[in-house]
Image (cartoon, grey):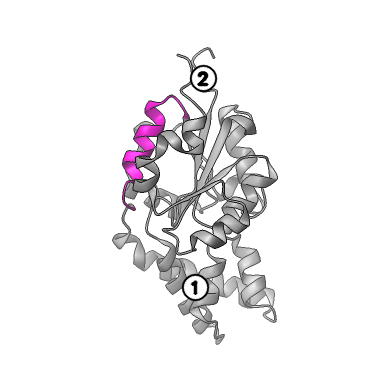
Amino acid sequence: MADAPTTAVLFDIDGTLVDSNYAHVDAWWRAFRAIGASVDAWRIHRAIGMDSSRLLEELLPDASDDERDTAKQHHTAYYAEHMPFLRPLPGARDLLEAVASRGHAVVLATSAPASELERLREVLDVEQWITAVTSSEDVDEAKPAPGIMQVALDKVGVEPSRAVMVGDAMWDVEASSKVGIPCVSVMTGGIGGDELREAGAAAVYDDAAALLAGLDDSPIGALGTPAP
């Protein structure tokens, strides 16, 4: 297709575009309590954004598969209680509009399950600017495995050298680096700038609004404006 985008910006959702990370922390904390396990909230927070199976292996190393499955079911139920209160993070909608207006493909590169993704898309209300979306159905293992990144690129037919990832966690940086995509990080997920830079982030901003304000000088700006 002659008018297909040749550049792409991939966006994580939880903690990057939607203020949901601490809802996940609370849901996991309660889920662990429900199966008789005690895990400190700060440890849970540091694992948010990681593939749920890996999260459970890390936080419940001695649990059985059945116990982990039960905890995952409790998390889904407790997180659902937070869904009505989710909101976009500052500048999220405007950033997606600005990126789309420059001619870049906008890809929501998430491994959220269908039930969560539907609500997240409702909260964002940016369907007119989205080119493609990934979900948990697209890969067997989520970040920091690189599968979601590759699927996102494949959906829009863009090479890694012509793409940028935007995320809030070390897992976003790690996953994108494995396929050769630079990652711009925001601190709205609760991870500090120094740690994100040490993980390999190409640039770090307070939030989506700050990235939008500095868009021209960011790695996204370096993609240029694709020719019509």
Residue position marked by numbered label 2 in the rendering: 4
Residue position marked by numbered label 1 in the rendering: 28
Q: Nearer the viewer, mark 1 or mark 2?
A: 2
Q: Residue at x 32, y 39 (%)?
A: 94
Kindly identify the amino acid type of the residue bearing the numbered disc 1. Answer: Trp
Q: Is residue 68 above or below residue 132?
A: below
Q: Which quadrant is home to the C terminus?
A: top left
Instruction: Say whether residue 138 is left or right of residue 9.
Output: right
Count all numbered tags in the image, as a single digit: 2
Kindly identify the amino acid type of the residue bearing the numbered disc 2. Answer: Ala
Q: Residue at x 61, y 42 (%)?
A: 149
Identify the mark nearer the N-term, 1 or 2: 2
Q: Residue at x 57, y 67 (%)?
A: 47
Q: Which quadrant is home to the N terminus?
A: top right
Tell me where residue 105 appears, x and y as whole percent: 48, 30
Report crowding for label 2: few under 14, some 14 to 19, many 20 or more residues within 10 A (C-alpha). few
Q: In front: 143, or 85?
A: 143
Name the element at disc 1: helix
Tell me where residue 4 appears, x and y as whole percent: 51, 19
Circle 1/circle 2 CB separation < 8 Å: no
Instruction: Say whether residue 68 is left or right of residue 15.
Output: right
Q: Is residue 124 above or below residue 66?
A: above
Residue 132 shows in this picture: no
Instruction: Say whether residue 212 is left or right of residue 177.
Output: left
Mostly what secondary structure, the magenta segment? Answer: helix
Query: Which range of residues does the magenta coloring cover?
Result: 89-104
Q: Residue at x 55, y 23 (%)?
A: 6
Tell me where residue 50 appears, x and y as whole percent: 59, 61
Name the element at disc 2: loop
